[in-house]
Image (cartoon, rainbow, N blue to C red):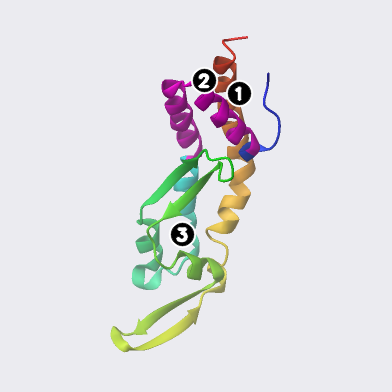
Amino acid sequence: MPVVGNGSERLAALAVRLKVAGDVTLRRELLRVLKSAANPLVKDVAEAAREKLPHAGGLNEQVAGQKVKVQVRTGARTAGVRLTTSAPDTKQTDSGFVRHPVYGNRKKWVTQKIPNAAGWWSKTLADKGPEVTTHLIEAMKVVEHEVNGGL
């Protein structure tokens, strides 16, 4: 019985079927395949940071060098693949601004607009998302086939 729906609905349904089947090995394989299918996004956001964030002062390289992790969640309400980062100012820079001390003076902070950087994270993921979703669904189809006993 094939699973229908969008990517996260399919993932949630497939995770439930794997849990019911008690196949830990196949579940691990699903998580591994989904992570590897989403890994190109890690490189894409690093490239976007290098390209769109300010070069002067090295903010672009600092943010691009931050660790980005791919998380696969299989809960009924949380099913999906998401990227997380350790960069504390990702939300700010993605919105087109950054707060920083003036010449290292921790008592005086300013908000600097960086309009060219707006969307460097969110737009990159939105633009690349459909392509990656196709790969994720193909990976889930393979696992679905195995869960169905190769039928």
Q: CA distance from mark 2 to mark 1?
A: 16 Å
Residue at position x 64%, y 42% from top?
Answer: 130
Measuring 41% from the left and 55% from the top, which residue is drawn there? 85
Residue at mark 1: 141
Which callout, 2 or 1, points at the residue further toward the start of the chain?
A: 2
| Mark 3 touches mark 2? (CB < 8 Å) | no
Q: Quadrant of the N terminus?
A: top right
**Residue 49, labelled with which disc?**
3
Question: Which SS type dominates the magenta stretch?
Answer: helix
Res 32 quadrant in image:
top left
Please state which of residues 145 and 106 is positioned toward the viewer in this rendering. Answer: 145
63 in relation to 101, above or below: above
Span highlighted in magenta in the image: 9-38
Disc nearest the viewer among 3 and 1? 1
As helix, strand or loop, the secondary structure at mark 1 comes to helix
Extreme residue toward the right, this view: 5
Q: Amino acid at mark 3?
A: Ala
Q: Amino acid at mark 2?
A: Ala
Circle 3 or circle 2, nearest the eye: 2
Q: Which residue is mark 2?
A: 21
Mark 3, other Cα within 10 Å: few <14 / some 14–19 / many ≥20: many
When the figure is inspected, residue 12 is found, relative to residue 151, above or below; the finding is: below
